[in-house]
Amino acid sequence: MATLGQPRNFRSAEPISLHNNLVTSVDLTKQQRFKTSSLAGGKRSFEAVNNGAAHVLNAHPQGQFRASKIIKCSPDDVENVQIYRPGSTPSVTQHPLLSLAHANYNLPSQLVRNFEILGVRAIYPWQSSCLMRSGVLTQSKNLVYTAPTGGGKSLVADIVLLKKVICNPPKKGLLILPYVALVQEKTKWLRKLAEGLHKEEPDVPGPKLRTRLRDVVVASFYGGSRSKVTWSDCDIAVCTIEKANMLINTAIEEGTIGDLGIAVCDELHMLDDEHRGYILELMLTKLLTLQLGIQLIGMSATLANPEVLAGWLEAKFFVAKYRPIPIHEHVVYDNAIYPNGILGEPLRTASQLDTSTQRLRQPTRRIEASLHQEMSNPVTNAVVALAVEIAEQGYGALVFCGSRSSTQSIAVLIARCLHHVFVPSSISESRLDALTSLQTLPGGFETALSETVPYGVGFHHAGLTAEERDILAEAYDNGTLKVIVATCSLAAGINLPARRVILNSARMGRDMVGPAMLRQMRGRAGRKGKDEVGETYLCCQKLELEPVAELLEAELPAVVSCLTPEKRGVTRAILEVLATRMISTYEGLQEYVRHSLLWHTVPNHKMVLDMLDAAILSLLKDKLIEVSDLDTYLPTPLGSAIVASGLTPEAGLFVHADLRQALTSFVMDSEIHLFYLFTPIPQPTTGMAMTQDVSWPTFRNLLEQLDDSSIRALRLIGINPALVNRLANDGLDNLPERNEEELRTARVYRRVYSTFALRDICNEVPINTVSLTYNLPRGTIQTLAQSCHGFAAGMIKFCQRMAQPILRTPPQPNDTIISPDAQFIAQAGTPFHGAGRSELSTSEASGFSMLAAVLEHMQSRLYAGARADLLEMAQVTFVKGRMARLLYEAGFKSVRALSEADAKKDILPIMMQISGWKLRQIERESNNMQSEEGDPAAEGNVNSKEQIYEMRRKKLEEKMLRKAEIMVRSAGFIYEREVLRSVDLEG
């Protein structure tokens, strides 16, 4: 065994010095050579994927379980040296432009006060320079800028967005974000900033123009949202990428796109994401082509070529490298911690590695080997030790893992090592409150959290429900939890900065994370106002040293267009501009393509025009567009319906085939056919439907439980029960997908499998039961239900558009929309009569209209998660599914009856009836709790299991009572609203 502080397993026995220079940990890792078997062509073991993290979810707390100690290797260790100097950032007195109240910004005084209330009393010098030098604030210039995570890039966009909307009353703002969680968080933030702000708007018309003041309205738009706010109702729309594109398409089609004054796009690097981000290019290209003076702002922390994107968007570009909190970066392997990038220039090539004579840097600290079998793997041992160390010091830690299973197991290990840590009774009580909030969720909760939350640890992954993730994030943000363990894929979707960020391997699943993902994860280190410094630790195994070294040195990839033929192509882009009537001529389409990122990143422009021609021919072949009498292009009803519903052309054709079949042979005496039409098309990369493998034994069991009419419906859809039985018997995983026909068949079977889960949700089956039936996490089931909400709305729009005649009148010269071919159309002076080839028959149009009505009724059940007789009750807050049924059976069959109930006497007993399993869970946990020094139970002077149980039971009851009171008030509000509506109708 190597002596402490000496290098181990180096190629040479003694380190060689060269002018006494030291090298970084990147060099050190590159100089390691280990005899390992190749992984090429072989599957990595489960243990390798999860870094050997033991599955300890069922382990009982053990007082003697401890994390390994971390020992300094040399007296010159600079690990915890304070290098942050608040004075390095100039004050407002030294630099007046750092105050938002400065006259040069010309911001409303109320907005400045709102920023101050929220803690923004001054901005950074780079933010001031960006706002003033770019002309973005004073001249409405377009802007592309990049700044490190945590450097304050969002604040620049907030200032520009709010000023544009407030100071230009007719104009609206659009903020585009990639994830629903970010949309919800940003909406809350902007509403706080907009509080007390007003816009002038025309009042009653008359001889004298009068204006009135009204509040600035901020609304969110995302798939699955139940909000009924429309584009016309709000001043600032905070949207996901898909919703923003649909809003813009609708505004173009309705001629209201001129109301848009500014569009802000966060995470602009997602442009080269061919699964979702490519829609950004479609959207921004449309806004550029319209030439309406809409201000465009794009930002990202991981842009490698901002100058290229600025050229495309006709924008200024600004690059900031300032971070308010310094970050110490480390690489950890073989229980040794090395600083990364402190001294020396990294070696770049393999030949340099072999000929290097530079002295290897000593580790600054070492982690003792663990005596516990669960932490025998060095990576697991390092992750746990580093997390426990910082939590014991009272700071926050964020741990990233490559899989859900390792996320939970690592969290439980960290929690077990924190059992002995003394915490004040107020913190202990807050943790029990957070656990009680989790236990009172109507959809149940992840029981492993009961092993971690009482000790200040939580985990965060897509398998949890949105409510669970929100509670955990809030508890971490307010200091109740000290450690959050999350999957790598959520690094961009959560805003949980920490003093210390720990990466449990550089892999996400079996693949290495990319440079952009690595920067996002490491960028979470350090919180302005809470931490003086940030720390990152990348923990890896010996066999990963070389790829980790390459990853640490890798440059960010340049952002390029995803509209190339090998990726997405331009078919959807062309269909959208034709279907919205933005463009109708070939010349106009050429002009549109010239405004795309594709044109700016592909030097061979002839190839781009060839792609345009191929896309037009494809759309004509699929009968999504047609040529009019004026040799212009028109959308067919099908093409128009596809764009209105937000589908891709491929998905739209698939859906159209299903809907036409439903019109000719719809099975009315079975719900399964309708639920199938509401189920999103399985597309593994979009997250729209369940992408897990189908369990064929489960599929067979579900088929066996169906009645004859449901089987008949499934046969019409394309399901062969005999094939399902054979697949179940043979133990196969998936159907082959080698050609178009096999791909369609596999889609149908996957979609039907998801349909069964959707049917269960709408028939009031508890989400826990659905999760167990399909062996899927509750979060996945919830995601399916939420994606179905958006997909159902799209299907209704699809049917409604198919039932409508196509508008054949061209845009007029005075229309808001100014397209490249508007003058050509105006000069033609002849309306688009067309040849009528695309019009639907009266019976088919009527059929789509009736189908839309039926789908609208089922959509209400989908939102409620209940049968038709509970739709009224399901409007009430916290009343969904099983709760609605129990209230109904207890005699509360209307919102009026519920509004007149006594929350404590009438509603609380029903809620506690649902919580029977939660009480049993609390009893089991109380029996397992040890009232020893440092245990949360001991802090409250609770010494017996009975007292622990009674304390937690009371907390549960208090939470339930508060929910019951909210339910009664909500019912009263709904009933009052219905009474007022009926009075208005009678009047």
Image (tube, grey):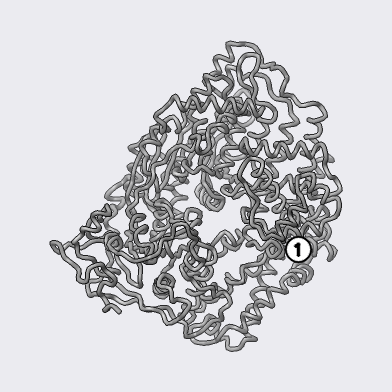
In the picture, measured across the screen, residue 770 lies left or right of residue 78, that is right
For label 1, count other residues whose C-alpha is less than 10 Å away and answer few (under 14), some (14-19) or many (20+).
many
In the picture, measured across the screen, residue 871 lies left or right of residue 473, that is right
State the image quarter where residue 927 is shown.
Answer: bottom right
State the image quarter where residue 363 is shown.
Answer: bottom left
Q: Secondary structure at mark 1?
A: helix
Give the residue type at disc 1.
Met
Q: Nearer the viewer, residue 265 or 64?
A: 64
Residue 820 horizontal/vertical position (percent): 52, 20
* Residue at screen point 86% across, 48% down: 669
Q: In this rendering, does residue 813 appear at all? A: yes
Q: Which residue is the site of mark 1?
A: 883
Judge whether 921 appears above or below 98 on screen: below
Residue 284 horizontal/vertical position (percent): 49, 34
Residue 720 horizontal/vertical position (percent): 76, 50
Judge whether 481 appears above or below 680 on screen: below
Number of marks in picture:
1
Q: In this rendering, does residue 121 appear at all? A: no
Residue 758 horizontal/vertical position (percent): 72, 54
State the quadrant of the C terminus: top right
State the quadrant of the N terminus: bottom left
Judge whether 454 appears above or below 966 on screen: below
* Residue at screen point 58% across, 46% down: 220
* Residue at screen point 83% across, 29% down: 843
Instruction: In the displayed orientation, state which residue is furthest to the left.
Output: 19
